[in-house]
Amino acid sequence: MPPGSLPAVRLPSVLDSADLPLAERCAVRLDGDGFVLGDGIIAADEPDGPVQRAASVAADARRYGLVLGGWTAAWVHVATDRLRRPLDLQTDSDGGARTKLLPVRQVALSPRDVCELGGVAVTSPLRTALDLARLEVRLTDESRSAIAHLVGSTRVTWPQAVAAVAATPAAAGKVRAIARFRAFRDGETPG
């Protein structure tokens, strides 16, 4: 480095209010150096992948020790292009973090149900697919596509996915999820 010059500063790939004030983030976007992703601005030369998506919505989850789940996790895992609001924030039923400032679902999570992406805990692709299959009253084309993408992104076959769901503890919608996973396994359209 030449004498008197300053070292180059590399900003995080996803900018939020902790990195730059709103006006400067807007300037980054307007200058074409970044684009909106989730709750942040992502550098124009960064890929739009799971790590960047997770980092763009991580602030509240990280602050309160929560897990991104459901449709939020499906968006993080690039199984859908639509980020739904409010975010699906979860806490473990064994006494994890709680807050009254945000809507949080209390769920039972095992260590294999959670992975870390972009500095935040996110339900794994298989757990996310299971949650969508359990909790969606009626599967739409978007939800069927998301479930298929999530299971397809793992090293799990449909017969193994059916067995994994059957082995989970009793939970609301478990029978519905098993039936839907079996329909995927058998090449049928789950409803």
Image (cartoon, rainbow, N blue to C red):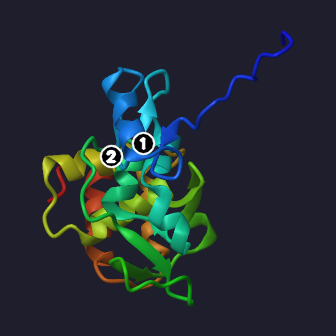
Q: Quick check: can you spot residue 179? A: yes
The quarter of the image holding the N terminus is top right
- Judged left or right of residue 155, residue 21 is left
Q: Three-letter amino acid code at disc 1? A: Gly
- Mark 2 and mark 1: span between their CA atoms? 6 Å
Q: Does residue 48 appear in this view?
A: no
28 displayed left or right of 81: right
Residue that badge 1 annotates: 152
Residue sitting nearer the eye, 55 or 79: 55
Q: Secondary structure at mark 2?
A: helix
Image check: 190 left or right of 90? left
Which quarter of the figure is the C terminus placed in? bottom left
The image quarter containing residue 41 is top left
Q: Nearer the viewer, residue 161 or 50?
A: 50
Q: Which residue is mark 2?
A: 148
Q: Residue at x 52, y 52 (%)?
A: 18
Q: Residue at x 38, y 86 (%)?
A: 100
Three-letter amino acid code at the position of disc 2: Ala
Q: Position of residue 133 (x, y in %)?
A: 29, 64
Residue 48 placement (x, y as % from top left): 42, 32
- Please give the count of numbered marks on the rendered protein: 2
Residue 155 sits in quarter: top right
Residues 121 and 153: in front is 121
Please tell me which residue lies in front, 106 or 154: 106
